[in-house]
Image: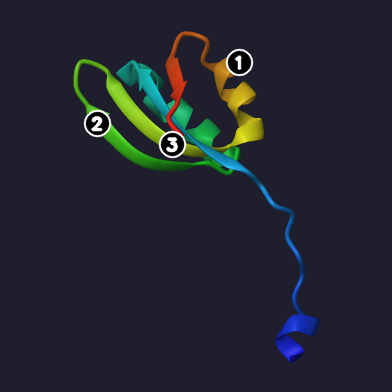
Amino acid sequence: MKAFTNSTLESYIHFSNYKLIINYNVLDKLINVIYKNKGTILDKIFADKVIVHISLPTKSEKIIREKFKMINMSLIN
């Protein structure tokens, strides 16, 4: 019971999963923006371009789209 009385409630944050196709020279900056917005990187695939699967608070999608206008970003869930 003591654990319940000393605990705090956190607000619910809805996350969505996205697939991003980017150029190699954007990867480091993108990773920093994802982490600053409480997102996580689920997978990276290196080919002609980098395919990055991320989980991001839905409200942060707009930030990514504004900072990286030239990337291909699609919702996957």
Residue closest to the far bottom: 1
Q: Residue 64 in the image: x percent, y percent?
A: 56, 23
Residue at which label 2 appears: 45
CA gap between label 2 and label 3 equals 12 Å
Question: In terms of secondary structure, where does tag 3 sit?
Answer: strand
Residue at which label 3 appears: 54
Q: Residue 66 in the image: x percent, y percent?
A: 60, 15
Q: Is residue 36 or residue 59 the one in the foreground? A: 59
Q: Residues within 10 Å of mark 3 (few under 14, many from 20)?
A: many
Residue at which label 1 appears: 66
CA gap between label 3 and label 1 equals 17 Å
The answer to which of marks 1 and 2 sits earlier in the sequence is 2
The answer to which of marks 3 and 1 sits earlier in the sequence is 3
CA gap between label 1 and label 2 equals 23 Å
Is the residue 8 above or below the residue 36 in the image? below
Question: In terms of secondary structure, where does tag 2 sit?
Answer: strand
Q: Residues within 10 Å of mark 1 (few under 14, many from 20)?
A: few
Q: Are marks 2 and 3 in contact (CB under 8 Å)?
A: no
Q: Amino acid at mark 1?
A: Glu
- In the picture, measured across the screen, residue 31 lies left or right of residue 7, that is left
Q: Are marks 1 and 2 in contact (CB under 8 Å)?
A: no
Which image quarter: residue 65? top right
* Quarter of the figure that contains the N terminus: bottom right
Is the residue 31 above or below the residue 20 in the image? below
Q: Is residue 47 or residue 24 the one in the foreground? A: 47
Which image quarter: residue 51? top left
